[in-house]
Image (cartoon, rainbow, N blue to C red):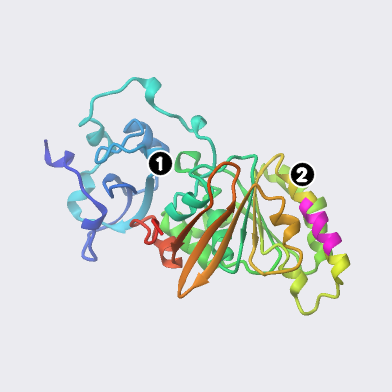
Amino acid sequence: MSATQRLHYLHEITEEGGKERFVYACLECSCVLHVSPTFEPVAETIESLENRCPGCNSPLEASICCRSAKVPEAWREVSRSALSARRPRRAETEFKTAASLRGFSFNFAPLDALVGHHVDPRWSVAFRGAPANAVAEFVCFRGQLPTQAGGWDSTVVLIDGGNRSDLYLFSAFAKLYGVHPRKALRRVVTSRAFTMYQLVDLVTNELPRVMDEYGARMVVLSDVFGVLMDERSEVDEQEGRRLAEAVARAIDAARKDALVFTTLATKTPYDRAVAGRADVLVELEEVGGRIVGTMVRHPFMKPASRQFTLRDLLFHNRRPAKGAEG
């Protein structure tokens, strides 16, 4: 085997590396698959390697990652073409294309264990609890990733009900995947609601129009009922329940054309309107600096619990997440 064909691993990267490069690697074994001075679609690496990691033979469609890092000068010769030459060619029918993927994936072990490795596009998924805000930002970014990387390859419509949008957190996720934050932000259409009546108007009247205008196939409603708990809200409980039901019906309508994620970060008396209708419901609670996730409802998976930290979520694309086996 020549020097250009030997395997390298992410843990070999040090602070004393050479030039900044885009590094494509396998999340399962940290094997480096390709190094490039410019960002290239992950589909090219997946196809070149026939969807198999040369290090551990795992499918790359759900385990490939890309990060920007300073790498040793010798790594400039690392290429997918050299690695593909190491393995025998397989029949083309064995390669799974993007069209064969069943749905969106978090590509983060604890959340995949709670929601499933692929989210059916017909489902409505709800996360309940204060840590759900971080999940909303994560979903907004991953929704625009290529389907080969478990994304949805779509503009994402974000409706922020609790004024909780966190640009710094969103940017951190983008940088983790080697995507410039400004480029990622251009694929998120954000609307904020400052009253419950504005929220109902947004999801009932404006959302269908925006989805059609931008061709969006993913919708994220962040802290959807947070606006109802604002001290300035003058909506009484009966009216609040009526408005909450209107929001839930609008979500049912949107999910016919889009994958819908809802977060209930602020606990309210109206959560059941959305949580009760969700195909997948996950509770998130912060305990001792860790996030405890519990799957409450799922179409076919048994209840489960996993633990992770925000740092795990922020750096999962660089190393295996801690607490995944929780």
Q: Secondary structure at mark 1?
A: helix
Residue for badge 1: 42
Residue at 46% across / 63% down in the picture? 172
**x, y (%) of residue 46?**
37, 36
Horizontal side of residue 138 vs 215, given as left or right: left
Residue for badge 2: 253
Point out the residue furthest to the bottom here. 231
Check the picture and name the quadrant holding the C terminus: bottom left
Q: Which residues are magenta?
A: 241-248
Name which residue type carries label 2: Ala
**x, y (%) of residue 322?**
37, 61
Residue 254 vs residue 325, the one in the foreground? 325
Query: Quick check: can you spot residue 194?
Result: yes
Q: Secondary structure at mark 2?
A: helix
Which of the 4 image quarters holds residue 163? bottom right
Name which residue type carries label 1: Val
**x, y (%) of residue 202?**
78, 56
